[in-house]
Amino acid sequence: MRFIVLGPPGAGKGTQSARLMQKYGIPQLSTGDMLRAAVAAATPVGLKAKALMDAGSLVPDDIVLKIIAERIEQPDAARGFILDGFPRTVNQARSLDALLKTKNMQLDGVIELKVDESALLGRIEHRAKETIAKGCAVRADDNPDAFKTRLDAYRAMTAPVSAYYAQAGRLKTVDGMAPIEAVAAAIDRATESLRG
């Protein structure tokens, strides 16, 4: 299974992706994690990314795509993968399709967690309280102002990716506001239908 889990910040993508990793025995490929790993391994692409990151610049799509291309060739991704944090724009989605085509691969589908944006703030506040209760540090972006900025960015840049995949007939939507177990069951039904 090769698929993408989409949804705004706080929609539960991480929770559901972790469960899918266990179920299918496939890795979750986070672009942030892949970039850090490529930098740590000092690969040619990683060194280019490091120079840009050190300068405070965003890593351009072509470098991110090269890192994804290297990562999906690794043995643990042979049975598939879940992409997390990519694509964020329609242009990235098109580039990803082209990359996969060069490797004789294709996405099995895209799962989108639909959520009530006004309820997400409550989720973020709850997550922050749970993190503090566990004695851990709260993510810098888990506060109302930062969350609103992230949500605005998602709405402007990433939401159109859903329409791109819907038009291609590859998008399955799931009610992300349901209890975790119900969301998981709905995703299972969606992934089974994607597998045919």
Image (cartoon, helix red, strand yellow):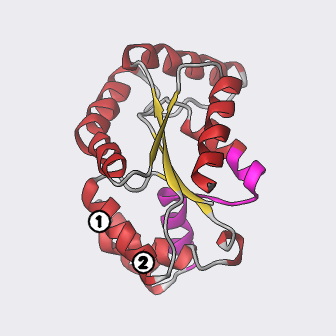
Q: Is residue 24 above or below residue 40?
A: above
Residue drawn at point x = 65 percent, y = 38 percent: 189
Residue lying farthest to the front in this orientation: 196
How packed is label 1: few (under 14 Cα within 10 Å), some, or many (20 or more)? few
Residue 152 horizontal side relative to residue 85, left or right = left
Q: How many marks overall?
A: 2
Residue drawn at point x = 48 percent, y = 71 percent: 68
Residue 138 falls within the magenta-colored stretch = no
Residue 47, given in percent of the width and then of the height, sits at 43, 80
Q: Earlier in the sequence, mark 1 or mark 2?
A: 1
Q: Which residue corresponds to mark 1? A: 55
Residue 97 horizontal side relative to residue 26, left or right = left
Camera-side residue of 174 and 144: 174
* Residue type at numbered disc 1: Ala
Report if residue 83 is visible in the image: no
Residue 56 horizontal side relative to residue 190, left or right = left
- Mark 1 and mark 2 residues within 8 Å of each other at the beta carbon: no
Residue 44, given in percent of the width and then of the height, sits at 45, 86
Residue lying farthest to the bottom in this orientation: 44
In the picture, the quarter occupied by the C terminus is bottom right
How packed is label 2: few (under 14 Cα within 10 Å), some, or many (20 or more)? few
Q: Which residue corresponds to mark 2? A: 101
Q: Which mark is residue 127?
A: none
The residue segment tinted magenta is 20-41
* Residue type at numbered disc 2: Lys
Q: Is residue 153 above or below residue 177?
A: below
Kindly state the secondary structure of the residue where label 2 is placed. Answer: helix
